[in-house]
Image: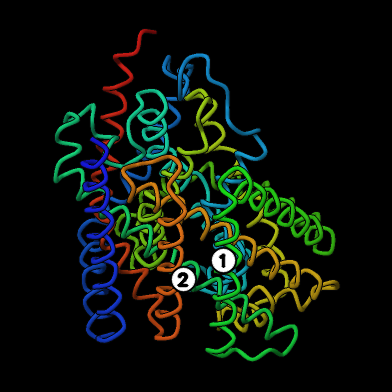
Amino acid sequence: MNSVKQKKSNAVFYISLAVVFIIVAWGLFAPGNFEISANKAFGFLVGNFGWLYLLVMSLFIIFSVWIALSKYGKIKLGPDDSKPDYSFISWFAMLFSAGMGIGLVFWGVAEPLNHFAGTMREPGTQAAADFAIMKSFLHWGLHPWANYSVLALALAYMQFRKNKPGLISSVFIPLIGEKAAKGPIGKLIDILAIFATVAGVATSLGLGTLQINSGLSYMFGIPESKLVQIIIVVVVTILFMMSAITGLDKGIKFLSNLNVGIAGVLLIISIIIGPTLLIFSSLGKGILMYAKDLVVDAYPFGKGAWYGSWTIFYWAWWIAWAPFVGTFIARISRGRTIREFVGGVLLAPTLASLIWFACFGTLGIETGLETAKVAIAETSTAFFVVMDQYSLGTLISLVAVILLCTFFVTSADSATFVLGMMSQNGDLNPDLKRKVTWGIIQSLLALSLLLSGGLKMLQTASIVAAFPFVFIMFFTMISIVKALRKENI
């Protein structure tokens, strides 16, 4: 029996490796053709299915709130007598580090300034500032976390309550039966999940490398070069391999707690040295605008190309990340009730993200339109350009670079863990050899695409490849409800 499982596990592993290498080879050796193909496919999806992304992302919020408040909310993700494996702080730290991580530092200043100096409102005006904060709240608020919540909840329920493998395909057992879920359809779902995870994480690691290099260049004059980027990737790879060897309870847990601590210090210092009252005013006003226009902004039908390149792009990108983040959140959530799970995954990280963007968005906007234009000329340096305008700005930039490194290590470490699970028949504790293999592949992929300028291409390709997850996520909601109806409550 074990040998059969191992063969099935290896089939998913080797096919996934082959798919990843084919896509990477295409991107490296025929970048022009790859970029044209990926952009055409993405343009087709946005043009024809943008409404679908908008619809399902809002459904995820409605579903998450409904299931938490329903009679099913008291069901444990595990046996009835199970207790949470991790304290709330460690649990939040791990899910937040995996779910956002580098993106918050990369876009915390850059996105609001793009909207502030953009074309949707008169640049530099109060209307543009309000629009910048509200849209940043929309893109990084409830929608992505509800998206993660849906898949993570179904996975955790099937893993810990029903003792099924920790695979995306397991989610569909209540809907199509165990035999079909373990057959070709299930294998295809798991292979797509692995590709979406590898591509998404490699893109983020590449972007993180660029920003670390930019920060070191801006502060210490270290050149922005291929050699420096190679050194950064090698050093961080060694660090996350060390973390992977120590395991989930020590490595990822320790680093995630460290991340939250450093992020908290960065946030507090920034609020103190910045326009403090204005930051809190932006937070309060932004939340009110966000709440008021949540439904309207979630359905920007017929409002032009801006929404395709920002809102719909984000929705597609979050869905592409759902297999990785959902699998990881599920793995660390045993013993929590459904109500506690949804509350923790949906509300706590959303609030943290809103405070983050209110702080750094306001810091950026307050430097004025001319500085904003300079900052957004190169996204990877936007944070450092803005911080240079404030006292203690160098200290904040240094802390930000440290945070980028710890987020980088945690994201890569979490991803190797998840990829090990996905390619080892859903084993909740994948072996070290499998994790190390995926860790090296991730780093090499990020490095090769970084050196060839293909990060944006890979991001677009991963979103295209993850399009089936729109349907997978939709049917996940139906499947989990079907399973919950059989509970004796």
Mark number displayed over residue 107: 1
Q: Is residue 70 left or right of residue 308?
A: right
Q: Residue at x 55, y 45 (%)?
A: 95
| Residue 428 horizontal/vertical position (percent) | 43, 39
Q: Amino acid at mark 1?
A: Trp
User: Vertical placement of 167 versus 235: above or below?
Assistant: above
Q: Is residue 1 left or right of residue 150?
A: left
**What's the CA distance linking mark 2 and mark 1?**
22 Å
Q: Amino acid at mark 2?
A: Ser
Pick the quarter of the image with the N terminus.
Answer: top left
Pick the quarter of the image with the C terminus.
Answer: top left
Q: Is residue 398 left or right of residue 210?
A: right
Q: Residues within 10 Å of mark 2 (few under 14, many from 20)?
A: many
| Residue 162 horizontal/vertical position (percent) | 35, 24
Residue nearest the observer in this picture, 259 or 239: 239
Lower sequence index among marks 2 and 1? 1
Q: Quadrant of residue 215?
A: bottom right
The residue that mark 2 highlights is: 443
User: Vertical placement of 178 versus 38: above or below?
Assistant: above
Residue 377 visible in this rendered orientation of the protein: yes
Q: Secondary structure at mark 1?
A: helix
